[in-house]
């Protein structure tokens, strides 16, 4: 029965994800079992497990639910004895087989452009714009529209689940639509490194250099991954320079600003900062609510009979502030749960179904959020907050941020010190004590502390 169900699901997925994605990412999956609402699949590699879960997990879960399976979560495992599937999955996706923006022409097929598959869901139309991301969205739009290269590179950075990858995919889709003749490569920094190592091993470095230096648009996700990897950084630097010299567009994303990436060579930091560097801020309530409303509209086709009671979306937007990915996952769980047991999604049912998510979200304030909020409040740069400068105009806000980090998070003194540029725990202890003393004598500091505390706990 389960195998029959998976057969039906595979047929549906083949139509929804396309032949190339199906052949490379869905077909190699080996359905194992469903136990306790968890559907387990065996996959050839860890890379593939992570990619499938990230890019096709929601679709697989939705189709399995439609087929009558009582599934609330997917689990992808690599067998300890090696893959049991006959068809090996690619260790890395390639443009010719996974839907890279430019359809590979006959003369290009041997070159095997090293791109990663693009998610059809991640377009500009599906990107919800709010104050925290409006600048990043506008910059991405400008680059995607083509024309003279003005922002080079465009560097997008921010925490997990704030929309960096969504914007990267959206840019690639838009370029494909407007200029299908352009050679566009989108991949992660990790894949760039794998390709580089493979070229070294196979003694094909000239082919590697030609591949990456002949593209029109190079998009590299999570560039912080190459920090500390000297040889990869060297090759990335030369590739970067070659493309800039040819006036080719480069778009980079990372989890932090170039100057804040530890173990990244100074010359690369300098190069990355020479274009437009844009921060995607943590989401606000209005943006989170907008994302939920957008997702509900998208899910209506798959779950036409499900209804959500008034106030549920507002409750989720208020309580789940970690990131958009967690928010979307919570909504997907509600829909899956309701489709299995039937009935309206009420506030009470949402609270019961999402107990673990809501509990985790209660610990929502992070040291980085505190640092950014304090830096914004005092009008200083985030990099100064964790940097070495000891000017009073910077040192005092830094002490306030350390005090709030100790009060609003569960981090220890040494842990907080590490997040403030690798400072010693005694420095943090001194800062906390000093701010506590100032609160009793300096009315402005007391007011600042209270205002910041309320803003962070909201």
Image (cartoon, helix red, strand yellow):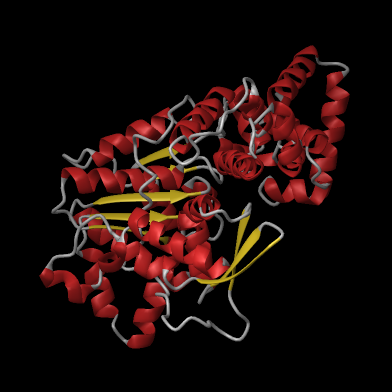
Given residues 127 and 383, the one toward you in this image is 127
Q: Which residue is at the far front?
A: 1
Residue shown at the point (69%, 40%) measured from the top left: 366
Residue drawn 52% across the image and 27% down it: 287
425 vs 244, left or right, is right
Measuring from the top left, give residue 308's x and y in whole percent.
Answer: 59, 27
Residue 234, image quadrant = bottom left
- Quarter occupied by the N terminus: bottom right
Tell me if 448 is positioned left or right of 22 in this view: right
**Residue 332 in the image, given as x and y percentages of width and height:** 57, 42
Q: Which residue is outermost to the top?
A: 443
Q: Is residue 439 left or right of residue 189?
A: right
Q: Is residue 455 above or below residue 265?
A: above
Q: Position of residue 375 (x, y in %)?
A: 61, 30
Q: Nearer the viewer, residue 395 or 450?
A: 450
The total number of labels drawn is 0
Q: Nearer the viewer, residue 15 or 82?
A: 15
Q: Is residue 115 visible?
A: no
Which corner quadrant holds the C terminus?
Answer: top right
Give 24 or 37, whichever is nearer the viewer.
37
Residue 163 in view here: yes
State the image coordinates of residue 205 (x, y, percent, origin top left).
Answer: 29, 79
């Amino acid at each position: 029965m389960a195998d029959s169900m998976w057969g039906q699901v595979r047929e549906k997925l083949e139509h929804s994800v396309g032949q190339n994605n199906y052949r490379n990412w869905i077909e190699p999956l080996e359905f194992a079992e469903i136990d306790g609402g968890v559907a387990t699949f065996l996959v050839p590699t860890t890379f593939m497990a992570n990619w499938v879960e990230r890019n096709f997990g929601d679709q697989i879960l939705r189709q399995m639910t439609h087929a009558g399976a009582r599934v609330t979560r997917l689990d992808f495992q690599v067998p300890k004895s090696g893959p049991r599937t006959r068809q090996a999955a690619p260790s890395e996706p390639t443009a010719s087989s996974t839907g890279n923006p430019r359809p590979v022409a006959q003369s290009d097929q041997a070159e095997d452009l090293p791109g990663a598959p693009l998610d059809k869901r991640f377009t500009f139309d599906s990107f919800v714009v709010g104050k925290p991301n409006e600048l990043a969205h506008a910059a991405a739009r400008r680059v995607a529209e083509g024309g003279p290269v003005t922002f080079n590179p465009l560097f997008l950075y921010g925490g997990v689940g704030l929309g960096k990858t969504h914007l990267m995919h959206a840019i690639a889709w838009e370029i494909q639509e407007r200029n299908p003749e352009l050679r566009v490569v989108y991949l992660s920094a990790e894949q760039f490194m794998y390709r580089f190592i493979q070229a070294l091993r196979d003694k094909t470095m000239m082919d590697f250099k030609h591949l990456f230096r002949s593209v029109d648009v190079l998009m590299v996700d999570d560039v912080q991954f190459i920090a500390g990897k000297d040889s990869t950084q060297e090759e990335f630097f030369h590739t970067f320079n070659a493309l800039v010299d040819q006036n080719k567009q480069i778009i980079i994303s990372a989890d932090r600003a170039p100057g804040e990436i530890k173990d990244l060579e100074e010359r690369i930091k300098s190069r990355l900062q020479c274009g437009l560097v844009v921060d995607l801020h943590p989401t606000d309530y209005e943006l989170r609510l907008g994302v939920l409303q957008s997702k509900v509209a998208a899910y209506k086709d798959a779950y036409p009979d499900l209804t959500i009671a008034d106030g549920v979306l507002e409750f989720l937007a208020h309580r789940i502030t970690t990131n958009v990915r967690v928010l979307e996952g919570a909504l997907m769980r509600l829909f899956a749960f309701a489709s299995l047991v039937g009935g309206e999604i009420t506030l009470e049912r949402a609270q019961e179904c999402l107990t673990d998510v809501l509990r985790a979200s209660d610990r929502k304030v992070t040291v980085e959020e505190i640092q950014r909020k304090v830096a914004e409040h005092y009008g200083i740069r985030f990099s100064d907050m964790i940097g070495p400068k000891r000017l009073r105009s910077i040192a005092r806000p830094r002490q306030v941020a350390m005090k709030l980090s100790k009060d609003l998070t569960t981090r220890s003194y040494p842990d907080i010190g590490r997040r403030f540029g690798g400072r010693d725990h005694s420095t943090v202890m001194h800062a906390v004590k000093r701010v506590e003393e100032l609160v009793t004598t300096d009315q402005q500091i007391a007011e600042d502390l209270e205002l910041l505390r309320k803003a962070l706990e909201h």
